[in-house]
Amino acid sequence: MTQTIAKTPDWAAVWAAARERLRRELGEAVFDAWISKLVLLDFKNGELQLGAVRAFVRNWVANQYVGRIERALRAEGAEPASITITLVETPPMVGGGLVKEKPPAQVPMPVAYLPMQSSNPGRPQEARHGLSIRVLDPAQSFDTFVPGPANELAQRAARTFANEEADDVSLLYIHGGFGYGKTHLLNAIALEARKRGRRALLLGAEDFMRQFLGAINRKDTLAFKEELRAADMLLIDDLQHLCRSTYTMSEFLHTLNAYADLQRKLVIAADRAPSGLDALGADVRSRLSGGLVVALDRPDRATRLAILKLRAEDYVKKRPQASIPTEALERIADLEESSPRDLIGFFNNLALYADLTKNAGTFDAAVDAIVKRGTVIRKTSIEDIQRKTAEFYKLDLRDFQSAQRSRRVARPRQVAMYLSRELTMRSLPEIGRRFGGRDHTTVLHACRRIAALCQEDPVFRQEVDFLKQVLGKAS
């Protein structure tokens, strides 16, 4: 039974308070995309009328967020009998305040949305999930990106896109090895774009694929397409993982064309240039190559040292009593093959030792251990393992990325995965990504299978041991 409110609430104040509650509950990205677009129009006979200037926003909010709006209003002491969302021609006021004058034209929804009217009162109605976007990391901004000869061009291009200075170019394609800073730049672009009031969507390629296939299963692809194209800027990370699905590659091409037609910005990151993504069709490669293509390379020593010093400065700010000698940073910076991600991992280990011990001898031993670990990574990389294994088994490197399951390809690929786990510090998910975007369980199965075969077949074990010797680390 609904409790009757004796005093008519101040709906403008209630709506303002409910908006702030929704901002906290939903997060800035969702709030800015949907709730901030609504304006309070009228209230009478228990019916609350909200307005939206775009039909897609009206429909999406009505389908997904009207229940959340109703609960937020109730939490602020209001008891609306129903909520109706109408299409208006007048843009909403800043802050979503009450429109005093009736808009010139209103197109009412065919039905009023009655919140919380489930057949089971004890169970709220289920709402469909909107497009899930990656949560931005405030620490990965342009201020924390250390430029150098290997990445300066990519950083400048990213800033240009974020600052809306590249009017004649709609697509930016950034490529480089794992851990070189691609995700950092995409995150920084999205942060800057949102500061300027632009709606930026940052998606991993696997998120794009999973959500699109989910929309197909729900027979809701139109909503997926419309929400994706509603952004001012779309950023997709790790494009190479999208190449496994024909359906998603087709949808990706449609997205490329749509953003070009709408003259909106699209930023793509991948581990190689468009020409190196063999699973892409010629039309997609042509479209990507027609954008601004920039590369991220391995940083030089000066950049590596600058990355470590920036981390050290931030560390000392948080722990003024702590101290990390410059000599230790310089020794780590000497690891030539280390990526920025490797360096950050080394520094985190160094900082942990600095926290746990005050003994100079123990700290020096820790530095020695970190440098030794970095030397192993420098001598043996997944790329080296793939290249040597392909040469040994007379395969093309692209076979390791392909979906082929023939024994001629599958067994050497399993060997390369096994060696990657044995000879590098990479995690199972990262190894899987380097082998055509495979799942970590596939890598684990491969490692267990090769280990078992080494026990069962002495000849096969000799092959694996030989590859280890070639790669510089015999067991």
Image: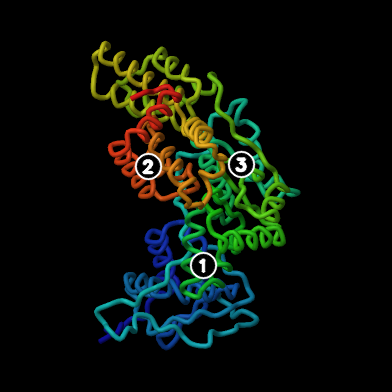
Give the Cα distance between marks 3 and 1.
38 Å
**Residue flagged by tag 2: what amino acid is it?**
Leu
Q: Quadrant of the C terminus?
A: top left
**Residue flagged by tag 1: what amino acid is it?**
Gly
Q: Earlier in the sequence, mark 3 or mark 1?
A: 1
Q: Residue at x 42, y 24 (%)?
A: 313
**Quarter of the figure with residue 420:** top left
Query: As rendered, which of 385 and 168 lies closer to the eye?
Result: 385
Q: Is residue 420 above or below residue 100?
A: above
Q: Quadrant of the N terminus?
A: bottom left
Q: Earlier in the sequence, mark 2 or mark 1?
A: 1
Label disc, if present, on residue 428 of the rendered structure: 2
**Residue flagged by tag 3: what amino acid is it?**
Ile
List x then y, in percent, for residue 457: 32, 37
Query: As rendered, which of 305 and 473 lies closer to the eye?
Result: 473
Label disc, if present, on residue 174 of the rendered structure: 3
Q: Which residue is mark 1?
A: 96
Q: Is residue 43 visible?
A: yes
Q: Is residue 144 visible?
A: no
List x then y, in percent, for residue 209: 50, 59
Give the Cα distance between marks 2 and 1.
48 Å
